[in-house]
Image (cartoon, helix red, strand yellow):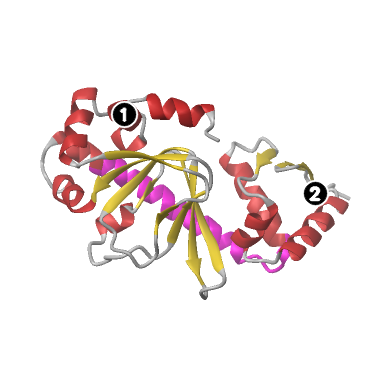
Amino acid sequence: MKTSQGTDMDRMSLTEVAGGLELFRGIDAEGVEDALFRLNAVKRTYQKGEIVVHAGLEATRLVAVASGHLHVYCAVDSDHPVLVREIGAGEVLGLWILHVPEVKCWPGTVVAAADTTVVTFDMEQSRRLVASSDPVYARLTANSSRIVSRELFSTWRKLMVMDAPTIEARVKAYLDELDSESGHTGEVEVPFDRERMAEYLGVTRPSLSRALGHLRDQGLIAWRKNVFRLKRAQST
């Protein structure tokens, strides 16, 4: 069943959807429409669970998420795909491939984690246009560089989380990072169910449950479904 947001996206034109993307920030409607034409842009909605790209296939198009979110999986072996990243609204899949043309294929499989509307762009045409001196495409280049920089910072933060010495420390570090992203409100919503959260943190589901229980027993967290409230350790 489609969400109301997904239905609204279906009714919006390609130009309206793309104009709301960070990739086109600072570009007027006429510039957006021209860029969409020259980039051979296409809008598409994927249903939850539908595969967007397969690992190993040639990366021929950028994928910008307009609504919903995607999960990126890399396979440790054929039976155990590992969730390595979530791509939310406003983010763009494949920007680093755009800037590193030596990479030809998708390194992971991407699945719609919810009903998700995307706008895709021709990869080779994108490379040619971002290298031009046209001010519209200079703005596209600046926007894409900012998005890539944020993605690299997010990857660095995940590495810091994964470097925690214990599972409890890893879980707490992850929740603290989400809290930092939301402005230190002390309340965060985890974008995964428990199984996907365990995959993302590289632990088993039972190990995650034990770690959450221990943190709760220490008075450091409380939760209701996917919303966690972080509590500061009491000084003695």
Q: Earlier in the sequence, mark 1 or mark 2?
A: 1
Residue farthest front in this picture: 1
Q: Which residues are magenta?
A: 141-168
Amino acid type, residue under disc 2 in the picture = Leu
Where residue 158 sits in the image (x, y, percent)?
55, 58
Q: In this figure, which residue is indicated by the disc labeled 1?
A: 19
Which dot marks residue 126?
none
Name the main secondary structure of what is drawn in magenta. Answer: helix
- Gap in angstroms between the C-alphas marked 1 and 2: 42 Å
Q: Is residue 220 magenta?
A: no
Residue drawn at the location 32% of the way across and 32% of the way down: 18
Amino acid type, residue under disc 1 in the picture = Gly
Tell me the SS state at disc 1: helix
Q: Nearer the viewer, residue 201 or 34?
A: 34
Q: Is residue 210 left or right of residue 98?
A: right
Question: In which quadrant of the rendered view does residue 38 lie?
Answer: top left
| 58 relative to 65, above or below | below
Where residue 161 sits in the image (x, y, percent)?
60, 60
Q: In this figure, which residue is indicated by the disc labeled 2?
A: 220
Residue farthest left in this picture: 133
Residue drawn at the location 83% of the way across and 51% of the way down: 216
Q: Is residue 169 left or right of residue 218?
A: left
Tell me the SS state at disc 2: loop
Question: In which quadrant of the rendered view does residue 28 lie?
Answer: top left
Q: Nearer the viewer, residue 137 or 231?
A: 137
Where residue 225 sits in the image (x, y, percent)?
74, 42
The N terminus - image quarter? top right
